Amino acid sequence: MQMLASRSWDLLIADLYMIGLDGLELMRRAKAQGALPPTIMVTASPGDAQGALDLGAVAVLPKPFAVGEFERLVESALGS
């Protein structure tokens, strides 16, 4: 979290389920600090990802995914 708040980021890519700090909690904390960049949430459980969209994620990427789909979402999130 210190790293996220220490500077401006163009994009956040996080997994919905991570050990210690899940993707939703990461988004909540970043949002509370005013440091939530455009976010792509990666998950093997897309049915559980509505919370990420509610918090402002620009996309949910179901695993497994094709590299081309990942690239397309990153480019879209960055406005390329």
Image: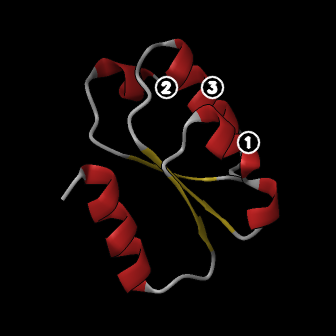
**Image check: 70 left or right of 10?**
right
* Furthest-left residue in this view: 80
Name the residue: 38% across, 20% down: 5
- Which amino acid type corresponds to the residue marked 1 in the rendered image? Gly
Cα gap from disc 3 to disc 2, whole angstroms: 11 Å
Residues at marks 2 and 1 touching, judged by CB atoms closer than 8 Å = no
What secondary structure is marked by label 2? loop
Asked whether, in this view, residue 48 is left or right of residue 11, the answer is right
Instruction: Residue 12 in the image: state x and y as whole percent.
Output: 42, 45
Crowdedness near tag 1: few (<14), some (14–19) or many (≥20) residues, C-alpha within 10 Å: some
Q: Is residue 2 above or below residue 27?
A: above
Q: What amino acid is labelled 2 in the image? A: Met
Above or below, 19 relative to 66: above
Q: Are marks 3 and 2 in contact (CB under 8 Å)?
A: no
To which quarter of the image does residue 41 belong? bottom right
Q: Earlier in the sequence, mark 1 or mark 3?
A: 3
Binning the other alpha carbons within 10 Å of mark 2 as few (below 14), some (14 to 19) or many (20 upward) gives few
Q: Which residue is mark 3?
A: 28
Which residue has dot 1 on it?
Answer: 51
Residue 78 in picture, x, y percent from top left: 26, 51
Q: Say above or below: 73 vs 14.
A: below
Q: Secondary structure at mark 3?
A: helix
If the image is split into quadrants, where does the C terminus sit?
bottom left
Mark 1 and 3 residues: CB-CB less than 8 Å, in contact?
no
* Residue tagged 2: 1
